[in-house]
Amino acid sequence: MIDGIVRDFGAVLSGFLGVSTSMGQMIGVGVMIFGWVLLMAVVMKVMWRYRRALLRGRELNMSSITRPRIPGINVLTALHLPTPKVKFQVSGIKGLGIAVFAVVIGFGGALLLVIQTTDNTPHWPQPGAAYALGMPMGTSGTPLEPEPETPADRSQTLKINLSDGIRIDTLDFTGMSLGKIGLSTPCFQIVRNTGNSTGWLYVDEFTVTGSSSAPTFTIDNAEVFEAHLGGKMDGHTMEATMTSTVSDQVVESLRNVSSYKGEGTVDRIIINLLGSATVKTLKVHNTSCSLGSWDIDHVKVGKLQIDGTTRWGAGTGVNSASVVFGETMKFKTMVDTIVDTPIHVR
């Protein structure tokens, strides 16, 4: 628990002061130790002031502490050699001060030990890392290299590597804010990893709901058994291909599956397929992108729902499509309630 408090407090100070995460943690430890010392001093002062009330009228007396006598060394006395005598006077306010000092030293040492054993490994869904979800230690991320556009800044990408054969109950992105100045790649993307030319993401239900938005949105190389498409769009192109050969995707068995929920602020989300993966529910709710596009590829979905509260548009007008359902998107049935209207997502 202390480890988490130190990490979170350090992250807050790092963002507020503009320093590195490790420096923020060290400053945080100093602030916590100082606060603890101040609190202990105030508590001890109040206790000493009202000691008679706390002790029901009696005075607080502490016996002095002397060095214990060790038998068998009387030869020192016989030789008239001086022997050291150690005596501590710990009665009254001095004794309380020594006790406070000892507590402070112990608390400070414990915090420093925690810091020494604390690493900077990101944990899901902390940005700037790639996560192998569903695998052992999959919630511990591998830090990503800085973006080429801003090499001096740490990457803020949330990258999810789905290994071949993985099964996930729910992959949930709720209340997330995406995009950054100068972003030239999609802010939400489902892609195949290099060397993976046949993998698919099989999804029982894929929902995009709430105030989710982005400047542009493209779906290609996809199969959807049942599509419910809505929302307001700054012009859209519907070229999807209707075919009876598209299969429904049914994911009912939840044996040996995991659930993951992303939250917070990142520059982009990448779902990277190392092979083929299966997800019962892929949920995107109230997740908006200020710059960049949504690029959905290599998915086979039982039910795709983009509800009427979503907004998509680059401000180019309804005669220039901001949303494209490409001809390589195949579907079995579709309900289309899309409304074309001028929109500029910023």
Image (cartoon, rainbow, N blue to C red):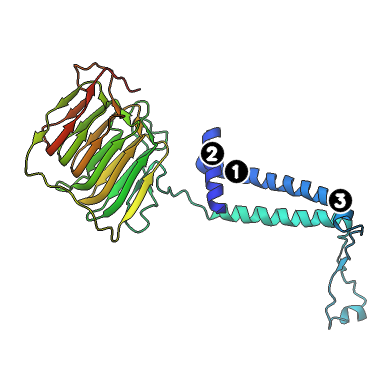
State the residue at coordinates (29%, 48%). Answer: 161
Mark 3 or mark 1, which is nearer the start of the sequence? 1
Distance (Cα) linking label 3 and label 2:
38 Å
Residue assigned mark 3: 50
Give yes or no for contact between labels 1 and 3 (Cβ–Cβ under 8 Å). no
* Element under disc 2: helix
Q: Say what amino acid the circle numbered 1 marks.
A: Gly
Q: Residues within 10 Å of mark 1 (few under 14, many from 20)?
A: many
Closer to the camera in the image, 254 or 326 = 254
Q: Position of residue 291 (x, y in %)?
A: 33, 27
Placement of 177 over or under 253, stated as above or below: above
Residue 242 quadrant: top left
Please, which residue is most extreme toward the left here?
244
> Where is residue 86 drawn, in percent x and y?
86, 66
Question: Which three-letter amino acid code belongs to the residue tagged 2?
Answer: Val
Query: What element does badge 1 sit on?
Result: helix
Residue 102 appears in view: yes
**Residue at 87 percent of width and 49 percent of height:** 49
| Residue at figure coordinates x 80%, y 56% from the top left | 98
The x and y percentages for residue 44 are 80, 51
Q: Which mark is first along the chain, 1 or 2?
A: 2
In primary-sequence order, the first of circles 3 and 2 is: 2
In front: mark 3 or mark 2?
3
Question: With respect to residue 277, does 84 lie above or below?
Answer: below
Q: Nearer the viewer, residue 208 or 152?
A: 208
Q: Name the residue carrying label 2.
A: 12
- The quadrant of the image that shows the N terminus is bottom right
Q: Secondary structure at mark 3?
A: loop
Instruction: Please give the name of the residue rendered at 69% of the width and 44% of the height, measured from the top-left corner.
Output: 35
Specify the label residue 28 is tagged with: 1
